Image (cartoon, rainbow, N blue to C red):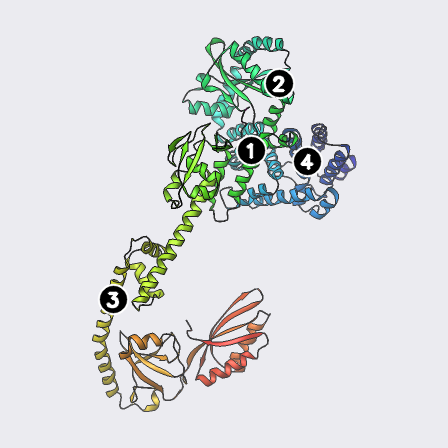
Amino acid sequence: MKELFMENRDVLDKFERKEIEKSYRSLLRASKNLLSSQDIAQVRQAVEMSLSRKKEIRRPSGKVSAIHALEVANIVASEIGLGRTSIICALLYDLVQNQDVEEHEMAQVFGESVEGIVAGLIKVKELYTKDTSVETENFRKLLLTLAQDVRVILIILADRLQTLRSLYLYHPDDQQKIAAEVGYLYAPLAHRLGLYSIKSEMEDGVMKYTNREMYSLIAKKLNETKKARDKYINDFIAPLKEELEATGLKFEIKGRTKTIHSIHNKMINQNTPFEKVYDLFAIRIVLDSKPKDEKSDCWKVYSIVTDKYQPNPSRLRDWLSIPKSNGYESLHTTVLGPEKKWVEVQVRTQRMNEVAEKGLAAHWKYKGGEGEKGMDEWLANIREVLENPERNAVDFIDDFKLNLYDEEVFVFTPKGDLRRLPKGATVLDFAFDIHSGVGKKCVGAKVNGKHASIKQVLNNGDQIEVLTSKTQEPKIEWLNVVATSRARSKVKQALKDIYYKESEFGKETLARRLKNWKIELTDQLIHQLVKHYKSKTINDFFRGIAVGEIDVANVKDFINSQKNEESDKEKQDLTSQLKSATNFVANMDELSDSDDVLMIDNNLKNIDYTLSKCCNPIFGDAIFGFVGVTGGIKIHRKNCPNAPEMNSKFGYRIVNAQWTSSGAANFQATLKITGTDDIGIVSNISQLITKDLKMKMRSISIDSDEGSFEGRVTVFVNDTDMLGQLIKKIKNVKGVYSVSRIDSFE
């Protein structure tokens, strides 16, 4: 280690070198009971790698990153209780992040499990380097690591806790931002994972920076009342201690002042000043019991406490019989102590206390407990929330936070199977917890043998038999009934599916009826109908038909009225338009035949016409004329995609037309070209058109996709022969698959 300090003498001052040495020794002490001698050797190797970088990296606080990594590793070992792999990952992930060592090198030295966790840590850290907020979609990516390895989140919690402890070194703006994030996400997450000590420290730390005035006030008052509080605790404990010693139980009993954040919450919830908050502290009795005697010993202690002091029956909390889903086990009661003050007493064993302090990591130590099963169920629910790709950020965060808090009710199926649901859960939540199919068909339930609606809120101990119906379908009102994120997600998805099916059914119904009436359901007609019925979207319109909000017969009446109006107007205008065209020809006798390229209706020339953009005719195409509604004649190709409809519906408006000569006219033509997306192919095509063939090019657009391209080129040509020559030339360009003329150049 000394050699490494010598190598870093330029970047580490005397104080920092001492800090590193101190943190390293502390880490060894903390992990002494967790690691074998071989594990310790690997941890030392990880520390040496962390210190071997040529240029030391400092954090925004100014602290050397190697010191921060050692402090995080200490939390991982001593306060969470994780082992070799997690300690090494905490030491190394910053090293990999700064590219001082490659991930594959780390796998060779420490194993693939270390590499995998560090990779997850780096993904999380990258989000912070991009200055992202937990309120964005990146929040999902951060927490998705939970689905890979929970140790990633535990190490991140340790990192955030150490950052919070060093927050006084940060800029005030950064203090507010980091504290708010810890309070918003990480403190509740620590609570849900059973890390109560970390959760409490985070909450107090957050309050210190976000509500400094109130924090300082409560801290000052706690300090002022400490002497009186300690005396009261000793007076309360003394007779209990005597009674417990007489039973022969091995125990530890002490008073614990509640956190500043907890006291502040009581002041708010009870709407009372500090002086009137009666439960500023709690008495905790921790037993050294054998596993088979744990519950009986706890209840024995409870009996002694309640014999000595009068209990409040409404304040009994039994988490021995049914632990919380995060594994928390304890027995809580509130009793009337000296001076008629209410005092909370907590009874638990050493194992239970370690689980309460170290949460999930302690479950790995004490395998097979009910808490471990409950934690697995919670993690499964979280993964389901995380892995839904259709959630927006706001809904996602709201639903995730629904899963964080663990106020629970315990209910039973008719067969006696225990189900754990959040407080406030309803019959409908229970149905979806059983299975999404059961939830979708739920019409009610029998709760404790009595009929209940889907809205009924469940209580502890309820036995529920779900009632279903084949005809039942989810309704939008259900979103106001359910309280769990799982049920809410399933209801939203079911409503989307139903809406889509109704919309499709409405479209099929309308198309079938219109077909019987020999009316085609075109896009233009659909948009007219959506506008007429003031529907928000096309799907809303079709759904209106499906559910009977829009009568199909009325749709037919609307279409016919539109046709009649259009037909009457067109017939009125047609005579005047043709007459105008004839008068125009009579006044143009002095022009020679060569001044026009078209002859309309056998002998009419010099007519006011335009070339239709729907088929873009050019000299040489077989064509016809169509008298427009607003005047003039539009020239279409005979193979125009709109020709059949014009012939069948408006045959009286069609006139013959033919080319006389191309003259000096230039016509626009658009080509569709596909080929291999090779470098220079677009340039080759452009050069062929403009330089080799001396043709004018109006536009060119190219779309590439996975090695191939599709493009459109609009050019000016004299006639179809010239266009045919161009198509032939482009086909010979290397890499071109196909060339074809398309109707429109727009």
User: How far is disc 4 from disc 1 in space, using C-alphas?
Assistant: 26 Å
- Name the residue beneath numbered marker 3: 560
Q: Please, what is the three-letter code of the amino acid marked with disc 3?
A: Asn
Quarter that holds the N terminus: top right
Q: Please, what is the three-letter code of the amino acid marked with disc 1?
A: Gly
Q: Depth check: 10 or 219 in front?
A: 219
- Name the residue beneath numbered marker 2: 287
Question: Where residue 459 sits in the image (x, y, percent)?
Answer: 43, 28
Tags 2 and 4 touching, CB below 8 Å: no
Q: Which residues are magenta?
A: 320-326
- Name the residue beneath numbered marker 1: 374
Q: If you read the primary sequence from the N terminus, does the residue marked by circle 2 or circle 3 appear first?
A: 2
Helix, strand or loop for disc 2: strand
Please identify the quarter of the rendering in which residue 65 is found: top right
Question: Where residue 425 sits in the image (x, y, percent)?
Answer: 44, 34
Tags 2 and 1 touching, CB below 8 Å: no
Q: Please, what is the three-letter code of the amino acid marked with disc 2?
A: Leu
Residue at position x 57%, y 15% from top?
A: 300
> Circle 3: is it few (<14), some (14-19), or many (20+) Cα within 10 Å?
few
Q: If you read the primary sequence from the N terminus, does the residue marked by circle 2 or circle 4 appear first?
A: 4
User: How far is disc 3 from disc 4 in space, using C-alphas?
Assistant: 78 Å
User: How far is disc 1 from disc 3 in space, using C-alphas?
Assistant: 65 Å
User: How far is disc 2 from disc 4 in space, using C-alphas?
Assistant: 30 Å
| Residue mark closest to the camera, 4 vs 1 | 1
Q: Depth check: 285 or 398 in front?
A: 285
